[in-house]
Image: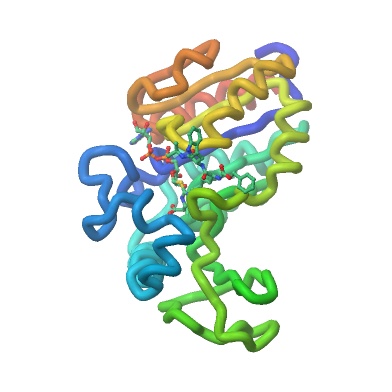
C-alpha cells in the first residue's frame, strides 16, 4: 500500500448489517415479505403506490432504532484524516455513514430521509411517513415519491463516481454482494485505470474474482483493521 493517495470505497448493505438493518439477499433478506426487486421499480410504484410508499416508510422508521457500528465509525475516521482524495460511494439508503461523521459521501441509490418530486425533480429532506401524492415543498405538486433509485433508473452521481475511479490508487468494496450494476462493475473500472482492488465481505461475492485481494469476515472487524493500515502508511 506504498503510494496510495486517492481512495474510492464502495459500501453495501453488509456494512449496516451489524447495526441491525437486514441485507437484501442474505437469510431473512426479505422486506415485509417482498423481494427488493419487486417493490423497487417504477412499475411497482405506478401499480401500487401505497405498497411502495409503505415499504420505504417502514425502512425509514427503522432508522430511529439503529446506530452506526464500528465499521461506519472507522470509515468516518478515515474520511476525517485522509490527506488525499477520498470518496465513499454507498449503495445504502440509510443514514448511518452520516451519523458516524462521514463527509465525502455519495448515496448512489438515494436516501430514505429524502423525498423526490416526480414533477419538478427537487430532492427534499423528509422525516416520518410519506403518503402517496404528498405535496412538494418546492413546486406544490402532489408528486412526492421516495428518493430511491429504482431498478431501471439512473443512479445518482455517476459522473463524479467515474471521475473518482479514474484517479483512484485503491478501490475497496465493503459488504456488497456484487449483484447490482453499475456498482458491481466499479471494481473492473478501477482496475482498468490502474487502481489496486480490495474486497472486505462476510463471504465471497459474485465479484470476488475481480479483486486482487478479498478478506472475509464481519465488517466491524475488517474495516477498522483496514483503516488502521491505511492511516499507518500515512
Ligand atoms: C441502471 C434501492 C441504467 C434502494 C437498489 C442484467 C445484467 C446487468 C445489469 C442489469 C441486468 N438487468 C438489469 C440490470 C440493471 C440493474 C441490475 O443491476 N439488476 C440486477 C438485479 C441484475 N440495475 C439497475 O437497474 C440500476 N440502474 O442500470 O440504470 C440506466 C441507463 C440509462 C438510463 C437509465 C437507466 C439501478 C440499480 C439500483 C436499484 N436500487 N436499491 C433500496 O431499496 O435500498 S438496489 C439494492 O441492491 C440496494 O441498493 C443494495 O444496496 C443493492 C446491492 O445490494 P447489496 O448492498 O450488495 O446487499 P446484498 O444483500 O445483496 O449483499 C450484502 C452483502 O453483505 C453480502 O455479500 C453479504 O455476504 C455481506 N454481509 C452481510 N453481513 C455482513 C456482510 N459483509 C460484512 N460484514 C457483515 N456483517
Q: Position of residue 207 (x, y in %)?
A: 46, 22
Write the residue at 34% across / 44% down: 24
Q: Position of residue 49 (x, y in %)?
A: 40, 72
Q: Quadrant of residue 164?
A: top right
Q: Which of the pair 219/163 is nearer the observer?
A: 163
Exactly how many numbered labels are in the figure?
0
Quarter of the image containing the C terminus? top right
Task: Say left or right for 208 vs 30.
Answer: right
Up the image or down, 211 lies above or below 38; here it is above
Task: Say left or right for 189 vs 33.
Answer: right
Q: Which of the pair 105/194 is nearer the observer?
A: 194
Report whether residue 175 is seen.
yes
Q: Which of the pair 114/17 is nearer the observer?
A: 114
Task: Say left or right for 50 vs 159.
Answer: left
Up the image or down, 199 lies above or below 87; here it is above
Write the residue at 35% across / 49% down: 19
Report whether residue 64 is seen.
no
Q: Position of residue 183 (x, y in %)?
A: 56, 36
Write the residue at 64% across / 49% down: 106
Q: Position of residue 136 (x, y in %)?
A: 61, 82
Quarter of the image containing the N terminus? top right
Write the residue at 31% across / 39% down: 25
Up the image or down, 176 lies above or below 168; here it is below
Q: How is the image coloured?
A: rainbow
Amino acid at each position: 500500500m506504498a503510494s496510495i493517495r486517492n481512495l474510492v470505497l464502495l459500501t453495501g448493505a453488509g456494512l449496516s448489517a451489524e447495526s441491525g438493518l437486514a441485507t437484501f439477499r442474505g437469510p431473512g433478506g426479505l422486506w415485509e415479505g417482498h423481494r427488493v426487486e419487486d417493490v423497487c421499480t417504477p412499475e411497482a410504484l405506478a401499480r401500487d403506490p401505497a405498497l411502495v410508499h409503505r415499504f420505504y416508510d417502514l425502512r425509514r422508521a427503522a432508522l430511529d432504532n439503529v446506530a452506526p457500528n464500528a465499521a461506519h465509525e472507522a470509515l468516518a475516521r478515515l474520511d476525517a484524516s485522509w490527506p488525499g482524495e477520498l470518496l465513499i460511494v454507498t449503495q445504502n439508503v440509510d443514514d448511518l455513514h452520516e451519523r458516524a461523521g462521514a463527509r465525502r459521501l455519495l448515496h448512489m441509490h438515494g436516501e430514505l430521509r429524502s423525498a423526490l418530486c416526480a414533477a419538478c425533480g427537487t430532492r427534499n429532506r423528509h422525516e416520518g411517513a410519506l403518503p402517496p401524492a404528498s405535496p412538494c415543498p418546492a413546486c406544490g405538486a402532489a408528486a412526492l415519491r421516495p428518493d430511491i433509485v429504482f431498478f431501471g433508473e439512473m443512479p445518482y452521481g455517476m459522473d463524479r463516481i467515474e471521475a473518482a475511479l479514474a484517479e483512484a490508487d485503491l478501490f475497496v468494496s465493503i459488504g456488497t454482494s456484487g449483484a447490482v450494476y453499475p456498482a458491481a462493475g466499479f471494481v473492473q473500472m478501477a482496475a482498468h485505470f490502474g487502481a489496486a482492488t480490495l474486497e472486505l465481505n462476510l463471504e465471497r461475492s459474485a465479484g470476488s474474482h475481480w479483486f486482487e485481494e478479498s478478506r472475509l469476515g464481519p465488517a466491524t472487524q475488517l474495516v477498522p483493521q483496514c483503516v488502521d493500515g491505511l492511516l499507518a502508511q500515512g
